[in-house]
Amino acid sequence: MGAGGLNQLLRELAPQVLGALVRRYGGFDTCEDAVQEALLAAARQWPGEGTPDNPKSWLITVASRRRIEMWRSDSARQRREETAYLLEPETDDASGVDDTLTLFLLCCHPSLTASSQIALTLRAVGGLTTAEIARAFLVPEATVAQRISRAKAKIKGAELTPPTDIGPVLHVLYLIFNEGYTASSGEELNRVELSAEAIRLTRQLPPSGEANGLLALMLLTDARRPARTTASGELVPLAEQDRGRWDSATIAEGIELITATLQNSPLGPYQLQAAIAAVHAEAAHAADTDWPQILTLYDVLRQIAPGPMVTLNRIVAVAEVHGPRVALAELADLDPALAEHHRVDAVRAHLQERAGDTEGARASYTQAASRTLSAPERRYLLDRADRL
């Protein structure tokens, strides 16, 4: 096995091994240290000695022994028979999916903030280093380290319960993907390592209607990434993208997944968003887009998962079906919580431009540009204002 294949295998096994240790011994922080040492041992030994027949069990055994050594040094006063029992770690052949999901749920503990959940998930489940997470989110490494440290302290001693609701996990993965697909700040529109990691981690979840819906949504959205920017990195809006550059294989996988899921699972928000993305993906040209179907899907989505962003996206569909003036009237009643979000100004500018209000559109594009922290978005919005 080459170095790349070994690194990939270890990254996939790491959360399963960590989940198994946490489930058995407790103590997230200490278990993570033990797993890291086991991974280092594997990276040193396996290239020369060969990969074990059961690499997961090998890692669990080595990590367990290291965990026990740590326990012994911290608890020398404990009874000798307790130590003797722990020195013979059980072979853990439990499902990797179950252990990974347990770890997911721990990292997405409700007591943690969203930023801490994201950082801890990427660190513990994704296997990213603190430096990698910091580079992905354009924040100091010390900031990420503090978030992870505080998160570990907060969940110390948290009870590991059987998986029931994976909603928080899906939400965190959705946030990670969105930050990778459209970075909230910085010079780059995409942070490919984040969106790719979100897709990889979502594939590890046990199949369910909403997990499948989220994966399909990610695939169908990420398939458009090659056409979203020019060679110089400038943003290209959906209607102007060269659809021949979309990833057809990823689109086919996403459409097949969401089609089967909608037929066999109770309807959920991620499935509806994936269905909307599928309608876009099925249109060979922007003019072929079935906007009435998209508007209908947004109407359903607004009923089962209302929110200001859902309403804003629906208004875009309203403009395509009923015209920009009708959409502008609905935009005037948008949730005040979004009043200063640059996307509201950008949508208003687009609708004003289509309605013939050149002065209003120019002002709205300029206002949107002043409110975004993304350099590619800012350049695009200012360019639209200049064209008017």
Image (cartoon, rainbow, N blue to C red):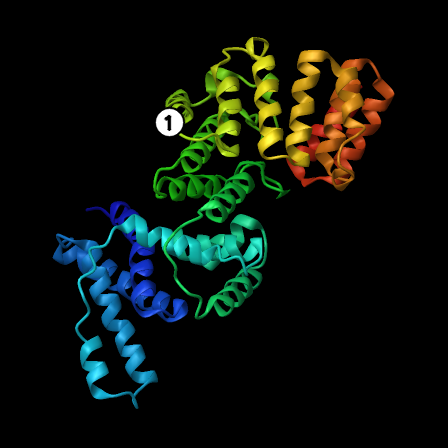
Whether residue 161 is visible:
yes
> Where residue 82 sits: x, y (%)?
23, 82
- According to the picture, the residue beneath numbered tag 1 turns out to be 264
Disc 1 marks which amino acid? Asn
Of the pair 269 and 50, the residue shown nearer to us = 269
Disc 1 is placed on an element classified as helix
Q: Residue at x 56, y 50 (%)?
A: 137
129 or 258, nearer to the observer: 258
Rendering coords of residue 233 (x, y %): 58, 31
Work out whether 2 lies above or below 142.
above
For residue 296, what is the image quadrant?
top right
Tell me: residue 39, above or below residue 353.
below
Residue 117: x and y, percent?
51, 55
Q: Quadrant of residue 71?
A: bottom left
Q: Nearer the viewer, residue 19 or 261?
A: 261
Name the residue: 49% across, 58% down: 109
Residue 318, picture quadrant: top right
- Identity of the residue drawn at 53% across and 55% down: 134
